[in-house]
């Protein structure tokens, strides 16, 4: 589903709209990102030999041409935005650290921060707490809750206690179709979900 939304995979049939007017099937991956859709994969992808600060600086929403990149210099607004994101992802104290030396959870937060530097309307997050410690999972929940009202988040996750903390609406898919939707409690009590995911 995320591959189709982001343009990585084209569906055999059907439609994909962002909002009510933007037909995503007419755009390629970079264009879809420019429209305001950011995606985070399960495994963190950061520039390990660069600092936390440099990773976020590279992710800034700016013109990425050769000349613009060679002569780029942070302005005041960009610096403020970068520091705001550092605070949001709890990495202000680590901004000079090499990204490769961060813990797994910190790398996940850094990648989320890199997405936030693009100021996306929609964030697609694939199993963001997989492999995290309990403390990191708790901090990630706090981070996601702090983004409410600023961005829409779509999270694919198997940790139901984490989902219970962050979710407003839970959707269960089966074979590419919506099986159930509602609060976590409603979905967990749905007989179809029990049948498909737990069996009899």
Image: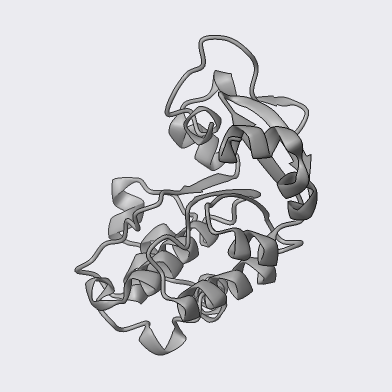
Quarter of the N terminus within the rendering: top right
> Visible in this render: residue 34?
yes
- Residue 132 location in percent, x, y? 41, 69
Give me the residue at 60% from left, 44% from top: 36
Q: Is residue 181 above or below residue 179?
A: below
Give me the residue at 40% from left, 52% from top: 42
Give me the residue at 34% from left, 74% from top: 52
Q: Is residue 180 above or below residue 42?
A: above
Residue 134 is left or right of residue 36, and the answer is: left
> Visible in this render: residue 17?
no
Residue 77 location, quadrant: bottom right
Q: Residue furthest bottom?
A: 93
- Residue 141 location in percent, x, y? 60, 70
The residue lying toward the viewer, choosing from 170 and 22, is 170
Q: Residue furthest top?
A: 13
Give me the residue at 47% from left, 32% from top: 3
Residue 92 is left or right of residue 54, and the answer is: right
Quarter of the C terminus within the rendering: top right
The residue lying toward the viewer, choosing from 176 and 28, is 176
- Residue 135 location in percent, x, y? 48, 81
Q: Residue furthest front?
A: 200
Residue 87 is left or right of residue 179, and the answer is: left
Residue 52 is left or right of residue 62, and the answer is: left
Q: Count up the numbered dots.
A: 0
Q: Is residue 158 above or below residue 25?
A: below
């Amino acid at each position: 589903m995320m591959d189709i939304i982001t343009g990585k995979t084209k569906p055999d049939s059907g439609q994909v709209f962002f909002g009510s007017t933007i037909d995503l099937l007419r755009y390629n991956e970079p264009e879809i990102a420019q429209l305001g859709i950011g995606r985070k994969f399960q495994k963190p992808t950061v520039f390990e030999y660069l600092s936390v600060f440099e990773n976020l600086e590279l992710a800034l929403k700016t013109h990425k041409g050769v000349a613009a990149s060679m002569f780029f210099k942070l302005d005041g607004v960009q610096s403020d935005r970068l520091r705001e994101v550092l605070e949001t992802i709890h990495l202000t104290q680590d901004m000079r650290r090499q990204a490769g030396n961060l813990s797994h959870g910190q790398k996940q937060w850094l990648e989320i921060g890199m997405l936030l530097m693009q100021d996306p309307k929609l964030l697609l997050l694939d199993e963001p707490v997989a492999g995290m410690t309990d403390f990191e999972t708790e901090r990630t929940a706090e981070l996601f809750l702090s983004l409410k009202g600023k961005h829409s988040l779509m999270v694919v996750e198997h940790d139901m206690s984490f989902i219970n903390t962050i979710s407003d609406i839970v959707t269960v898919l089966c074979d590419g179709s919506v099986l159930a939707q509602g609060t976590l409690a409603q979905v967990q009590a749905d007989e179809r979900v029990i049948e498909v995911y737990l069996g009899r």
